[in-house]
Amino acid sequence: MSAQSADHILLTRFNLPSVGAEGYIRAREGWLRHRVQLFEHYCLPSVRAQTCTSFSWIIYFDPASPDWLHDRIAALNADSTFKAIFRSSVSTEELVTDLARVSGQRHAQMITTNLDNDDGIASDFVERLQAAPSPHTRTALYLSQGLIKNGPKLYSRVDRNNAFCSVRESWSDPMTCWVDWHNSLYKVMPLQVLDGPPAWLQVIHGVNVSNRVHGRLVAAPKFAASFPGLLDDVETPSALDYVCDRGIFGPSRLAAQIGKAALKRATMRLGGREGLDRLKTAWITIKTDREQGKRMISSTNSVHGENNEEAI
């Protein structure tokens, strides 16, 4: 079966109301404006840069979104890059209906791909997914190689069950890529992991729920063509940077990752997903309060600086 025999739809939750850790973040003042900035800088331009344009993109927004966001969405989508849908929640039935309506349901199979609104994808991401050998049964697809951007530093990462997950399946009784957590799809269907150059970009910022720096420090130039405009502010690592990353920071990150994974497994065993979500919420409460404190201090310092200039 050829790759062209599938309707391909990217799926993004922008600010859907939710409970737990993510819901807590989205209720914080300033979250929405910050997320729009990340969307404009990373996610939207990366989708516009796709070498293959045979796909649709659905973005779900909260119907209670402020007026300024409605206006901004309309301005950003003047070229109809995505289909904005406003729902307070999305049931499986509603999702499938939206997928069929937006894609036109022209083929026997469908591909759904999760894309977070603060991340980016390589310019050939869609092309590579659609060129992958077509499975005979419902299958989760992962492009395993990616990049992680943390301020001016860039890291290469291999993640065989990353958040940029896709599901290829028949239109009859579809599950979609949102049937379970991206790292739990193996529980309900076979997996197909696709190797190759970096296919995605995760951006670390102050209010990430789960993303952390992983992988190895790398230079940006050889990846710039695949991520046009997204890596312009990445600094070129020095020889000392590489030595420190390989000998000190990399092993430290790995140890932290192992410890975090062990804590997550223990929490899941004791409290299930609800327990894990409570743990995330507690951590995020501390983290977001700290970030807001930093912004308040920065704002205060700026005001004091302006007052000093006026006094001079």
Image (cartoon, rainbow, N blue to C red):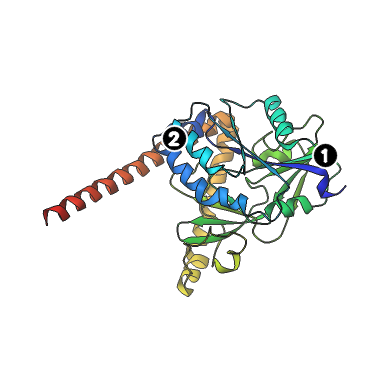
Going 54% across and 34% down the picture, which residue do you hit?
276
The kind of residue tagged 1 is His
- Around disc 1, counting alpha carbons within 10 Å, would you say few (fewer than 14), some (14 to 19), or many (20 or more)? some
Q: Tell which of 26 and 45 is nearer to you.
A: 45
Q: Where residue 29 sits: x, y (%)?
A: 39, 35
Q: Tell which of 64 and 140 is nearer to you.
A: 64
- Of the numbered discs in the image, which one, if any, rests on residue 68? 2
Check contact, mark 2 vs mark 1: CB within 8 A: no
- Around disc 2, counting alpha carbons within 10 Å, would you say few (fewer than 14), some (14 to 19), or many (20 or more)? few
The kind of residue tagged 2 is Trp
The local secondary structure at tag 1 comes to loop
Going 73% across and 41% down the picture, which residue do you hit?
186
Q: Where residue 178 sits: x, y (%)?
A: 67, 35
Question: Toward which corner of the image does residue 138 lie, by quadrant?
Answer: top right
Residue reaching furthest to the front: 78
Residue reaching furthest to the bottom: 239
Name the N-terminal-most of marks 2 and 1.
Answer: 2
Q: Where residue 95 sits: x, y (%)?
A: 68, 29
Q: Locate the C terminus and report the quarter of the image it occupies.
A: bottom left
Count numbered badges in the picture. 2
Q: Nearer the viewer, mark 2 or mark 1?
A: 2
Return the residue at label 1: 107
The local secondary structure at tag 2 comes to helix
- Distance Cα–Cα, label 2 vs label 1: 38 Å
Query: Relative to residue 46, is residue 207 depicted above or below?
Result: above
Q: Tell which of 120 and 140 is nearer to you.
A: 120
- Of the numbered discs in the image, which one, if any, rests on residue 62? none
Q: Tell which of 39 and 69 is nearer to you.
A: 69
Going 64% across and 59% down the picture, which residue do you hit?
198
Going 50% across and 51% down the picture, which residue do you hit?
41
